[in-house]
Image (cartoon, rainbow, N blue to C red):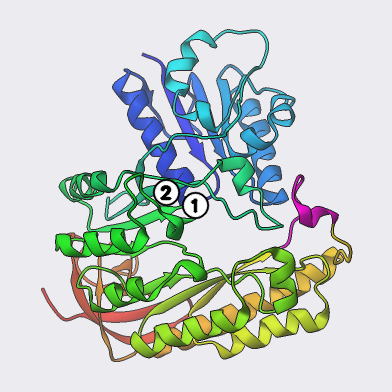
Amino acid sequence: MKTISLHTLGCKVNFAETAQLKDKFESMGYKITDFGNKSDIVLINTCSVTNNADVEARKLIRRIKREQPQSFLGVMGCYAQLKPEEVAAIEGVDAVFGQREKFRVPLLLNDMLGAEKTQVNVSCIDELPFDAAITTDNELRTRAFFKMQDGCNYFCSFCTIPFARGNSRSMEFDRIPFHINKIIEAGYKEVVISGINLGDYSAPSGEKFKDVVNMIDMMDVDLRVRISSIEPNLLNDDILHTVKNSKIFCPHFHIPLQSGSPEILRKMKRRYKSDYYKSLIYKIKDNMPDCGIGVDVIVGFPGETDEHFMQTYRLLEELPVSYLHVFTYSERDNTPAVNYSGKIPVNIRKERTAKLRELSALKQKKFYMSQIGKIKTVIPETYLPDEGVWKCWSENYVRVKFHAPADLKKGFHKIKIDTVSGEFAYGEAINS
């Protein structure tokens, strides 16, 4: 029996896809071993959203080949699709798999093992089919990530995702309940519905993302449902209304902004204006005051002056958002922005990144403090015996610790938040 280990870099969709591959390998008789353990085959599922992602992948590939020189090393994912020749040239890489070939890796491997030359299996990604994927993010199997959309048609000027992932495509609408029920049967208590551009979900039969949200809500399942990142122009009133009145959807949204400057947003080729974004955030908070809201933002985009940056800073400082994911702009080949004038020095990019991350910490603390005295629902995830507490997330995405026995039953528990310290809110269970 051959042993195989898999490792994932990047987004939750990548993690879900790696999990699907693990299932395929197991069904074919392979033995899955933890990444880092000696194995016959090592597969790395890569990201390529930034230059740093490419660098991280190269470092990992070289490290694995040093530690396991006899292992067959395959590389797949976005970096492999975008730059197959570059990946193939890394010493120790035995095979490169593109997005079209990724889910066929278990079938392709047998013919490649023992080959003297690096095998490159990367083809055109026009009209890719949709492949469903589901994974968990912790050993207690409390949270599953369910990919129901892939690819993107937006072509923002800084982004390589359409070239790495292909066109926007979606799962068949009538297959969604089947997968939701399978997640419940497997014992999960939370599912995060995910996609590369999730709000652009468009079923072959014509249903849109609002129909997905409404249909899942009507299932009335013993499960809580969280929506992953969604573009602001696709988060419409129908979705907000359903989430507000739902017993299962979490009051939590992650909504990319990228820049608070109207001029920079135009250069980024984003599909909304900063005034629209601002009104959307206030609409959400007016209707769901305890809703957690995360924001993606990019700093150091070509031509971003100090005033452009301060427009972003002031907007985020004003908005009642809960946390920021701050990205330092990274030049990407084959994107329009790489040729834009006005490149920002790296040291200034880093300074701006640091300022927004400091703001994020302040935003998070303020949001957590606003939850003191309130009763929230949590799902125990990780037990810390030294502290005698469980770590978990509330429905509105507050990181919580609370005292409870180590053998606490997995499921939904009510807690009252008492204090905030560091990156956690602390509470006490109010039900057995």
Picture coordinates of residue 430 (x, y %)?
Answer: 16, 81
The residue lying at 25 percent from left, 43 percent from top is: 175
Q: Type of residue at label 2?
A: Gln
Q: Residues at badges 1 and 2 in contact (C-beta under 8 Å)?
A: yes
> Looking at this view, is 387 or 209 the one in front?
209
Mark 2 lies on residue: 149
59 vs 405: above or below: above
| 10 Å crowding of disc 1: few (<14), some (14-19), many (20+) | many
**Which stretch appears magenta?**
329-339
| Magenta region includes residue 330 | yes
The residue lying at 70 percent from left, 25 percent from top is: 88
Picture coordinates of residue 341 (x, y %)?
Answer: 89, 62
> Looking at this view, is 412 or 183 the one in front?
183
Q: Secondary structure at mark 2?
A: strand
| Magenta region includes residue 90 | no
Mark 1 lies on residue: 196
